[in-house]
Image: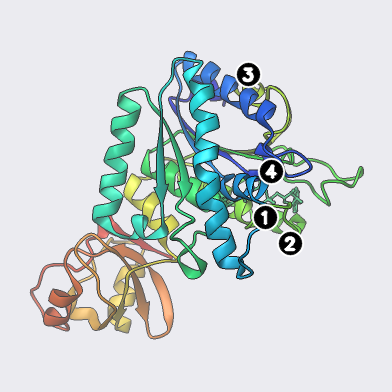
Amino acid sequence: MSLSTYHRIVIKIGSNVLTDDQSRPDVARIVHLVDQVAWLRSRGAEVVLVSSGAVAMGRSALPQLSHVNPVLRRQVWASVGQPRLMQIYQQLFEAHGTHIAQLLVTKEDFRDREHYLNMKSCLQGLLRDEIVPIINENDAVAVTELMFTDNDELAGLVAAAVNSDALVILSNVAGIYDGHPNDPNSQLIRQIDPNDAQFQRFILPSTSSFGRGGMNTKYRIARKAAVLGVDTIIANGKKDHILHEIWQQTGEYTLFPSQKKTSNLKKRLAYQGADPKGKIIINAGAAQALRAEERVSSLLPVGVTAIEGEFERGDIVAIYCGTEELGIGMAQYSSLTARKYLGQKGKKALVHYDYLLIG
Ligand SMILES: Nc1ncnc2c1ncn2[C@@H]1O[C@H](COP(=O)(O)OP(=O)(O)O)[C@@H](O)[C@H]1O
Ligand SMILES: N[C@@H](CCC(=O)OP(=O)(O)O)C(=O)O
């Protein structure tokens, strides 16, 4: 495997990659990263960036704020920092004759079918016109429970949305070590089978100074993306020529080689699992049918005992039997209609098996 065989690559850049050890914008590093992205593009790759750094840029511009509320302070820093971040990217990409575009998104944009499709078609349009999309969370409006765990989670969702071949997560460490990354006795794990959960024990709860989800989310997202067919790499974005090295299969990083390709929709469902719009409660017979390995089944209203929450056609819903979560799916019609059909025979499937992920 090599980046050079990839057509489309999502690259996530962590805040710590974009800032120096005094938390100031590391413009020289950003210049080098943009040069490398331009180099990948000159070799035919389509690149989508997921870039953190808004809060870090805002904090560096306005270290003293009157607000003591940490949530509000973060919103203010992000709204001040995001245009500064984009201004740097804009200038640097322009020097390569490349246009960039900004997309600020929230979790809701991935839960709501209409938002999701609009975002997806915008991304496709940008790539068709050879524009580099630069995506970040809309930190000004996404606070507390509305937030992604961090931008690694967002990058996984973006990789699914654009059907990318590879996801490169750039952090301030070379990848996952079998101990503390600063301990000289720790070894970098070069390859991780995404089906193998044993590496979890090496992940320490610590994050870097700006990091939110830490290595834990990177590990979780990398495994998920690889299982769904996206080669995923965790690498050190602070290392010179890291993208060149990954492209040429040299250098050091942790690779999660991809398993079989999965449909886009199943990828989206898998990432979206923790955050459905509504709940469908089904009886034991329906649960047994959905779980049966010998035959695929759609979820019919006859097996549904209750509907919780409000959803529209195309929204992601969780499927429960009692208190046990069986999986997730995409609703074929609204919660209003679903309630009307509750327990009835001969009605259209609420979740078609093509849009269902159990287990
Ligand atoms: N086993 C491990 N190997 C490598 N890094 C680890 C490990 N366990 C925890 N970490 C921590 O994860 C950090 C990277 O995650 P994070 O702080 O979220 O970075 P970013 O800002 O790039 O998203 C590293 O700086 C390191 O301190
Ligand atoms: N959206 C935030 C970044 C959140 C985040 O996940 O940060 P990081 O762990 O450094 O990738 C920002 O732009 O500051």
The mark closer to the camera, 1 or 3, is: 1
Type of amino acid under label 1: Gly
The residue singled out by tag 2 in the image is 205
Task: Kindly identify which numbered label has been placed on residue 16.
Answer: 4
Q: Is residue 253 visible?
A: yes
Q: Is residue 43 visible?
A: no
Instruction: Find the distance from the CA under tag 4 to the CA under tag 3.
Output: 25 Å
Label 1 lies in ligand 1 vicinity (Cβ under 8 Å)? yes
Instruction: Find the distance from the CA under tag 1 to the CA under tag 3.
Output: 28 Å
Q: Quadrant location of the C terminus?
A: bottom left
Question: Is the residue marked by circle 1 packed among few (<14), some (14-19), or many (20+) residues within 10 Å?
Answer: some
The residue singled out by tag 1 in the image is 214
Verify CB contact (< 8 Å) between mark 2 and mark 3: no
Of labels 1 and 3, earlier in sequence is 1
- Label 2 sits on a secondary structure element that is loop
- Label 4 sits on a secondary structure element that is helix
Type of amino acid under label 2: Pro
Label 3 lies in ligand 1 vicinity (Cβ under 8 Å)? no
Which x, y percent locates residue 231?
Answer: 53, 37
The mark closer to the camera, 2 or 4, is: 4
Type of amino acid under label 3: Gln
Label 2 lies in ligand 1 vicinity (Cβ under 8 Å)? yes
The residue nearer to you, when weighing 149 against 134, is 134
Q: Which of the 4 image quarters holds residue 296?
A: bottom left
- Side of 99 relative to 11 (left or right): left
Of labels 2 and 3, earlier in sequence is 2
Question: Is the residue marked by circle 3 packed among few (<14), some (14-19), or many (20+) residues within 10 Å?
Answer: few
Which x, y percent locates residue 95?
Answer: 51, 16
